[in-house]
Amino acid sequence: MKTKVIVFLLIVAPSLLFGQSQIRKCIICHQKPDIHKVMPTGIERPVYVDKKILKSSVHNTLKCQDCHVDVTSIPHQGLKIGRVNCARCHFNGNNLGAPNSPMYAQFWASIHGKKVRAGDPKAPHCQSCHGGHNVFKPSDPKSTIYKKNIPLTCGQCHKKELHDYSGSVHGVAILQKGILNVPVCTDCHGKHDLYSSDMSISHTSKQHVPDTCKSCHDNYSLMRKFKLTTDQADTYTQSFHGIALRLGEKTVANCTSCHGTHTIRKQDDPKSSVYPANIPKTCGKCHKGANENFAKGKIHLNPENRDSGLVYYISNFFFWLTSLTMLALFIHIFLDLRRKLKEKKETKEMDK
Amino acid sequence: MTENKTIVRFTLNERIQHIVAMIAFIVLFLTGFALKYSDNSVSGWLIQLLGGMENRSSMHYEGGILLIAVGVYHILYLLLTVRGRDQLRRLFFHTSDWKAFCVSFTHIFSSKRPDTPHGRFTTRQKLQFWLVMGGSLSMGVSGLLIWFHDETMSLFSKWFWDFLFILHSHGAMLVFLVIVLWHLYDIHLREAFPMDNSWLSGRLSLERLKQEHSLEYQELMAAGQIDGEEDEN
């Protein structure tokens, strides 16, 4: 017992105190709201740290130096202090308390990771999206990657996309109405597995767009919440466009060809690309001579659905006509073949 | 014996028309059903074999052109040539056909096919001819309108195009049933298994002519075009 107390006093307590004293020491300067540093480029950058936020973040047990490893002395004038390297702890297979996930490696293969590697100064690092001292769990509304905050986080750089998205049916739902069941940027584009749409592995590549949209629009219970059907997904899959795309055709329309990407709006919204008056223009992108007649009738037509009107009845009529013809022919052939074989047997017996 | 004695039932011209139509139908069925039943793995495999969706479409168009061409030729042949007009006259239905049709139902479970006397074309043959002609006509017209979809939709409407598509898609199945299930069984397989080669040789034995087309047999006998005497020997 005595030795344990001695060990605690000599080794553990100083290290704990030292850690606390380290933060205390740093925060003496960094809690001043106007504290800033001058970058080599001459730009001033605030280096203020909100202690309260840091203490409530997921990294509340870490010391400043655990991340800011190149800060080796106080004061640190003349020291070269670089960006925090999250990968010191955040790598797959770590035992340092950081989550283990293949997402770290995915980032470096993503379009953002590639740009970082290429030295693009605008390319985002971990902290660009996840925050610096304000790192919270994705489920925490304070987090920059909380579902509702994601459009704003991505919108820091992707301003036009944020503008378009904010007016779209998905954007209005989450940003204005607070409905969390709608897709934000990452739901379609991926999180760390984010690629340029030109790449076939991308969630938003020509071939993958239908599957990406279907991840919600094929979900009956989810669609029912919004008084939508899953017919759109099914009918596209069965349409010529859907079949051709699935079998490798690259020039046919997928969901976004007609509905748009960030600008998706309801069909009854005059700004929508699928608003009846806009149909000639939308179809006309591929189909020369498209006019208002293209809008007369349903595009996502399900002949098996009673709502399809005349087409439903014609389709049903043909179903029964075909079935009965098939049945009649089968019966006819069966009876006739039986008769034929009997005749053959009789003539053979007669020959004998 | 009359087994070796034959008459020319189909001229070379007619046989070539039949073969061209057959090739067109095979191409159209394969490329068409590959799209209709594209969920099926065989269809996917077939489309890859044909070189993708674009090639499938163009092959279907080419098959369509071939069928329309032979169809138009056949109509002209039936209307403009002496033999054609004679054949067409014999293809029309008569009251005797209606009787034969009814008799076939009353004899549906009997052990023998009813011995209804038939002319050059039996009721079943006439029915198949008109079904295939009507089917091909509606498939050809709807197919052309679907092919030029942009123009069709601009001129009419999207729902009209949907109607055409359903007509074409379901109609194809009906034509397929009539040709592959009925015609192939009834004409090509029933009387001579594994295959009646009249469609290639154009010839029919006198024995079968007498059995299946008794009225034509009598007609030819009366005209002296076949030698009935030898039949007895």
Image (cartoon, coloured by chain):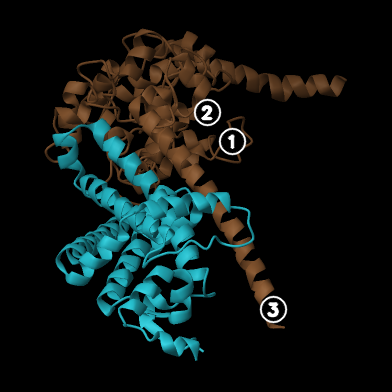
Chain colours: A brown, B cyan
Residue A222 x %, y %: 49, 20
The residue carrying mark 2 is: A66
Which quarter of the rendered picture does the C terminus of chain A lie within? bottom right
Regarding residue A196, the answer to whether it shows in the image is no
Residue B155 x %, y %: 14, 35
Residue under circle 3?
A350
Q: Disc 1 to disc 3, how far (Cα)?
A: 86 Å
Which residue is at a point 45% across and 35% down the rendered structure image? A85
Please give left or right for residue B165 compared with residue B36 in the image.
left
**Residue A265 vertical placement versus A288 (above, below):** above
Amino acid at the residue labelled 2: Asp
Q: Tag 1, which chain?
A: A
* Image quarter of residue A78: top left
Task: Tell me the quarter of the picture where residue A286 sits.
Answer: top left
Q: What quarter of the picture does the N terminus of chain A occupy? A: top right
Task: Give a yes or no on whether discs 1 and 2 share a subunit.
Answer: yes
Of the numbered discs 1 and 2, the one sitting upstream in the chain is 2
